[in-house]
Amino acid sequence: MKKIEFRKIIWAVLLWGFLHPAQARAQALTLEQILRMAEKVSPQVQAQLEKETQAKANTGILGAYQLPHFDASGVDSTGFPGSGSPAPYGFGGLVNSPYRSGMAGDVDATWTLFDASQGFGLTAARYQELSAQQQTRIVRYEVDRMALTFYFDACRYQGLKAVWQGVVDKIKPIEDQVKHFVRTGRYNEVQMLLLQDQMDQAQLNVDTYEKRYQMVIKRLGFVIGVNSDSIQVPDSNQLGESALSVLQDSSENPFLDLATYEMKSAKALSDSASAERLPRLYVAGSVGLMDNSRLVSENDYSGWVGLSFPLFDGFRIESEEQKNQALYREKTDQISAVQLRVNDLNAEFDEAIQVAKSQLGVLGPQHDDALKSFALAKDRYLNFLGNVTDLEESVRNVAQIETETQNAQMDLLIAMGSRSLFNGGHLQGSANAGAAAKP
């Protein structure tokens, strides 16, 4: 008997899940979850992270030229003395000497002690690495802003659908009462038709916002890599400014930081081109063993110091200077252009924020008055003291104010969130936190 009861329970659960798949899979997502999922699955973010890795590797490559290089070599030669010179790349020091014969092995070192051009080139590479990090922040901003906008738009349409569903719920009991009055002859049929028309219009708005919700939730699913059937968001009337508390503001705008690092990189490249006119200082040495030596006494080490002076290179250095100086001037001018763009967009965000806050400040008291007006019109109509026009107008007024309130609230959150992200804001604990350290 217990087995039969258990089987019934199991089959009931499976049947419910089959008949209600959306409810079984639905999950209420917060803004923090949306942004983290969007960054994780974004191919743009992943591609930019690879570019950042390339820039970091390039810095390591150029930095390696400023360190000493060590090579170990072993050779064996026979036949005519000195016929192994010049040796293949990587064979230097004692083993490359024409005065030795037979087997030999050594460890040799080379080191560029001074090359100003290399130093400035390494500085440019470091700034290019920082630029790549700022570009990653910008890509994250673009992905986060898209996800944030879709999320709050989905909440908007969810809330507006609830507003007009509330209108249907308000009219339905009144319509039932009016039908009774029509049957008893207290009201004529025209008044019932007017109420029916208003309820049909409200239901049309419900269906319209449902379609808009489904469209934006589908786009949100693309951004976060989740099937839209499994996404559920709260109504807009459940959200306030606290929804943005997951964002941590930053004092460093990634667009300005990128422009600054690109300018500094261009300056370093210009200095690197000019520094090619300076001499270079090299040292080299080796230590090892050999079977025999000819013409000179055998020794187990060698070393030398050398200076290289550029004399004429076909005006290449001058052309490099002109190119990189022009690049430096371009990047310097771009900083001013980016600053103007940042100021303009921040002004747009501030305007949208102030407008939304002003609307909400006015709509709050209006909503309270509209509810009182609806309650009075409903009471008067059902007690044969008012007409259906007053009732329709009061219902429409409540719905209009609630619609404007939901729109203003979501416009406010989108503007505040977008402004924070644009100026370097990020999720707390995110990989996008803050700007990179300066070299």
Image (cartoon, rainbow, N blue to C red):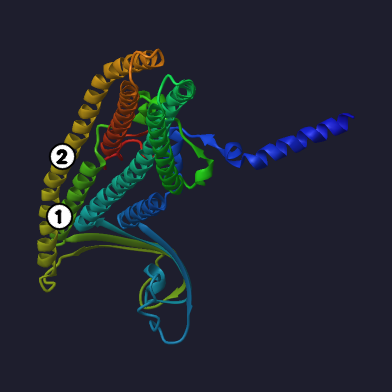
Position above or below: 291 against 306: below
Residue furthest to the bottom: 80
Look at label 1 and name its amino acid: Asp
- Upstream in sequence: badge 2 or badge 1: 1
Residue 99 appears at what percent x and percent y? Answer: 38, 76
Give the Cα distance between marks 2 and 1.
Answer: 34 Å
Going 42% across and 71% down the picture, which residue do you hit? 95
Numbered badge on residue 287: none
Identify the secondary structure beneath mark 1.
Answer: helix
Q: Which residue is mark 2?
A: 344
Look at label 2 and name its amino acid: Asp
Could one spot residue 365 in this view of the protein? yes
Q: Which residue is mark 1?
A: 271
Q: Is residue 417 left or right of residue 177?
A: left
Residue 218 appears at what percent x and percent y? Answer: 45, 47
Residue furthest to the front: 185
Task: Name the quadrant containing residue 386.
Answer: top left
- Along the line of sight, which residue is nearer the eye, 15 or 111? 15
Of discs 2 and 1, which sits in the foreground?
2
Task: Name the quadrant containing residue 283.
Answer: bottom left
- Along the line of sight, which residue is nearer the eye, 214 or 209? 209
